[in-house]
Image (cartoon, grey):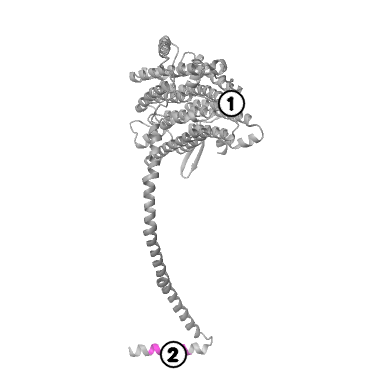
Amino acid sequence: MITDLFIHPTSWFILGALLMPFAKRLGIQKIWLIIVPLVAMATIYRLPDSFGIVNYLGFELQFGRVDKLTFIFLHVFTLMALIGCIFGLQVKETGQHIAAFLYVAGSLGVTLAGDYLTLFIFWELMAFASTFLIWYRKKQRSIEAGYRYLLVHTAGGLVLLAGIFLLYQTGHDLSFGVFSQEGAGWAEYLIMIGFLLNAAAPPIHAWLPDAYPEATVTGAVFMCAFTTKTAVYVLMRGFPGFEVLAIIGACMALYGVGYAVIENDARRILAYHVVSQVGYMVCGVGIGTAMALNGVAAHAYAHIIYKALLFMGAGAVLEMTGRSKLSELGGLYRTMPLTMIFTIIGGIAISGFPLTSGFVSKSMIVAAAGYNHQTILLVMLLLAGVGTFLSVGIKLPYFIWFGKDSGIRAKEAPWNMQLAMAMAAFVCILFGVYPAALYSMLPYAASYQPYYAYHLSETFQLFGFTGLGFYLMVKYLKPHDVSNLDLDWFYRKGSVRFINFAKGPIVSANEWVSNVYKNIGLSMTMALARAFSWFDKEGIDWTIDGSARNIVAGGNSIRQIQTGRIQHYIAAGVIAVVVVLVVVIFS
């Protein structure tokens, strides 16, 4: 049992987080940041199908359940942890590394969980650990965004917990398995909502573009990889074939793209594209066929890598220039050429350009929609692809690296950042050139060939016309330093109004109640206290004390006749007998 738990990949990151301060004192923090994810990655190849089963308070907890679906997510999560740690080697704050390790530990714990109680524990660990990756930026906006992020995820966790309680009440079984759409009730849909919040599905998505751009440079790289993709994993595990997910996913794909096109901040553009790209995955889960689910797994893997590459590129620009708004950037290709190349590779990968990972993963979901005769979903996903290429494939790199020269002459990113970006870019190209490297890890038996004439022709036509449209409308797509309102406006303004309401009527009502209590309630309470004190003293105590005095007096009287002389006892006995005889005779 202890051995099973010890080899759990999560244990390495928890241990790594606990020992991080000691590693810093010994001067081996950078080495420690590399060793821990490497050991965890090696561990996933030796995991048994089932391990870490514990009975606790009548519940059977399963910390380890491994199959092909589990493995592909474990593989990309540990790989991303390694890339993220390399990218953040220059970060000196030990707390930020501890938060990142605990965040990864939570994600791996959810992926391996075989029951909902275990899943919930690691689910909340993810939420709390990732919050510190926002707060560690130590700006007012980051602190505020972190609080909002934590509140939203706490609310989502409560919804998930409510669903788990209802599920246990109906079946007394907390095992994490596949739900049936036909028999789904309140419990199942509450659990789905809890998962969808972490997947950033509209209208409960605004926490993502609110928080990710405010995170630290390294924190944003970690956050773009784990929370939403862990949500995709649990949706695949529990809700394949739920038609509502197909609709939600397609809407996500278009919604995220729409905001990305009009955004100005580079990391906010990328945050909205997380919503859009996860929409493809949620849609694939809703379609539910073997090809669609394979496409979801493949796209989740590809997306984690190329989205991290894009966040690393934007983060490197922010690190070296202190700016992330497109309207303040331009002409950086002169001084940051390697970062430019890596960012462009990420941009064409997310767009689904041939010979990149996005081309061989995203197209599986689109093809599954077509094979399943879901034309509306197919058209929505294709339109989202056009918007992706327009906003991230063209607009983002153009206004950062080319466009109007901003006059900024920043240095190239540090070597560790370049190495991390090079690793991610290599994976993007590897899977595009050699799709079998990705397809061999897919969980279901469904073959797919991405490189066929119709698909290539369709892709080049979409990209060609999108590029032409950007060329003709570039002056209209020029970024402006404005704030675009999203649904987070409601809880931002709502919270302010609630605070004002709390300061006004609620405070006044509280003061009125306090005055009433002081003037009336307190006086009545003291009067009752005095009355009870009198009754206790004059009633209860008098009765008890009086009874005690009588008993003591009687005892003293009886003690007087106990002389110890036998002749006195004989005389007393004779008198008693005479008295009894007299009573009997005369009665």
When asked about the image quadrant of residue 196, the answer is top left
- Magenta part of the protein: which range? 571-581
Quarter placement of the N terminus: top right
Q: Are discs 2 and 1 less than 8 Å apart at CB?
A: no
Instruction: Tell me where residue 130 appears, x and y as whole percent.
Output: 50, 33
- Asked if 427 appears above or below 581 in the picture, the reply is above
Instruction: Tell me where residue 77 appears, x and y as whole percent.
Output: 52, 27
- In this view, the residue in front, 262 or 228, is 262
C-alpha separation, residue under disc 2 versus residue under disc 1: 109 Å
- In this view, the residue in front, 547 or 422, is 422
Residue bearing mark 2 = 575
Instruction: Tell me where residue 327 appears, x and y as whole percent.
Output: 47, 21
- Check residue 86 in the rendering and tell me which mark sits there, or answer none: 1
Is residue 344 visible in the rendered image? The answer is yes
Reading the chain from its start, which is encountered first: label 2 or label 1? Answer: 1
Quarter placement of the C terminus: bottom left
SS state under label 1? helix
- Which secondary structure type mostly characterizes the magenta part of the structure? helix
When asked about the image quadrant of residue 416, the answer is top right
Q: Any magenta on residue 585?
A: no
The disc labelled 2 sits on which kind of residue?
Answer: Ile
Left or right: residue 182 versus residue 260 is: left
